Amino acid sequence: MRTRLLEDLAGGCVSFGRTAFCSALGALVLAGAAAAEPTTLIDGAGDRAGHELRGARGLALDARGNLYVTGFLSHNVFRIAPDGSVRQIADESGDGAGQALKSPRGIVVDAGGRVFVAAEMSHALFRIDPDGTVKVVAGGTGRLAGQGLRRPTHVALGRGGEVYVCGQVSDNVLRVDPDGSVRTLIDVAGDGVHPLQRPNGLAVDARGNLYVAGAKSRNLFRVSPSGEIAQLVDAKGAGEGAGLEFPDDVATDAAGNVYVSGNNSGNVLRIAPDGSVSQVVGPQDPADAVWLGAPTQILPAPGGGLYVARMGERALYRLEPHGGLRRLLDETAPDGRRRLQMARGLLVAPNGDVYVAGLGTHNVLRLAADSLRPQAATGAAQAKRAASRRQAEIDGQAKRAASRRQAEIDGQAKARSEPKASGDRSPSGSVPVPPVRPPGSARP
């Protein structure tokens, strides 16, 4: 079935405190659309004082312009100040009281400058205070272990300073309020009808609704501020040819749209405010030769468009509002240096700058906003996409007509095969002959 990139992706940007990922997708690229050379903010040498950065993963930005990055493989967290100075603010020793910091991934910063880190293999959510104090606020092996947080990966920051964290193995999402109280918002029971299994993406919209994707259950839930839970989309996705398999990330935009990526279905779905579901990115557009593979993480771009990540790729692309795919970064710099491998962290700052974390290159790059402005499509590209849309409409009409005709044929065949009731005419149209009774037998 032919799929296409839909135009008019709503603009806007999720809260810059939300961790996301980014990676390459590869395909038709707008000519001359590469972004300017990025600035390297940190590399494998870390703070150059003996603390290395290995496996750069989550990114977050505070109100003062400090950038934070988690080292998934080096088990630490760094802060990069606006002047470029780098400092390690947490390491594998964790809270210093026996709770180690293992495999930190998602990270957010609240308005007070408190940093929250989901440490996957510690099964804990850590908080790093401005004075450097590190403590466990959910999960772990201590007194909070009974909350049942297993393999936390994603975190999100709410409007009131509350922090949400999902446990992939515990099949739940916990809410940690500023006063330290912790409660479960959703668990494996989902909405009571549809289960939540392996939550693998979180996002919060401007109204305070929380969105969580179930990778194993192949669905997306919304949890309202009052605690009402509703399933928004399931494995059927947007319909035939646009299902949802292994959703891997969620994002929201300023227009109220919600996006969810399907890793195994190779697509991105959009849920509009009215609840309608559409496929905005498909596995492949034959007309444009765009191969999007298995998108994992997504993030709407300021000014319209969408950043999309594919696991294991080594470049950064942007889907423009008109549908063109623009290459921003690839693995190799013009001088031959390897600058980006396994891009897994993506952050858009309020001024439009984009930060990218390379898990394989152990670095964080910054792209200036001026080099990332949306670009208009050429006349040829617009004509090509228009032709693709027309052909898709023709194909769709033909398929629906064939489906209706087949349904009619099947219905007629079923009617002919159904057994006839007593007293009906035989297939030849003759009246059935009543059975002959033996002489002297009584009438029934």
Image (spheres, grey):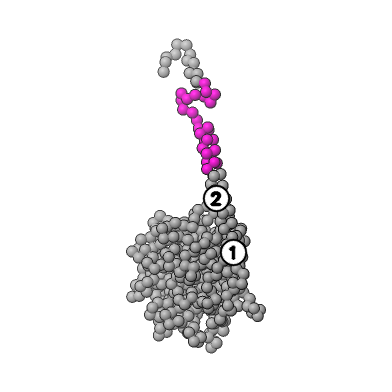
Q: Can residue 342 be seen in this view?
A: no
The picture places residue 14, in percent across and down from the top left corner, at 45, 70
Q: Which residue is drawn at 51% across and 86% down?
A: 84
Q: Which residue is drawn at 38% across and 63% down?
A: 223
Q: Is mark 2 on a helix, strand or loop?
A: helix
Q: Mark 1 points at which residue?
A: 379
Q: Is residue 39 left or right of residue 231?
A: right
Which comes sooner in the sequence, label 1 or label 2?
1
Q: What element carries label 1?
A: helix
The picture places residue 47, in percent across and down from the top left corner, at 53, 86
Residue in front for this viewpoint, 285 or 161: 285
Q: Mark 2 points at which residue?
A: 396
Q: Can residue 113 be seen in this view?
A: yes
Q: How crowded is mark 2: few (under 14 residues within 10 Å), some or many (20 or more)?
A: some
Name the front one of labels 1 and 2: 1
Q: Which residue is drawn at 45% across and 72% down?
A: 18
Which residue type carries mark 2? Gly
The residue furthest top is: 440
Say whether residue 31 is magenta: no
The residue furthest bottom is: 49
Which mark, by number, is residue 208? none
Q: What stretch is highlighted in magenta?
A: 404-430
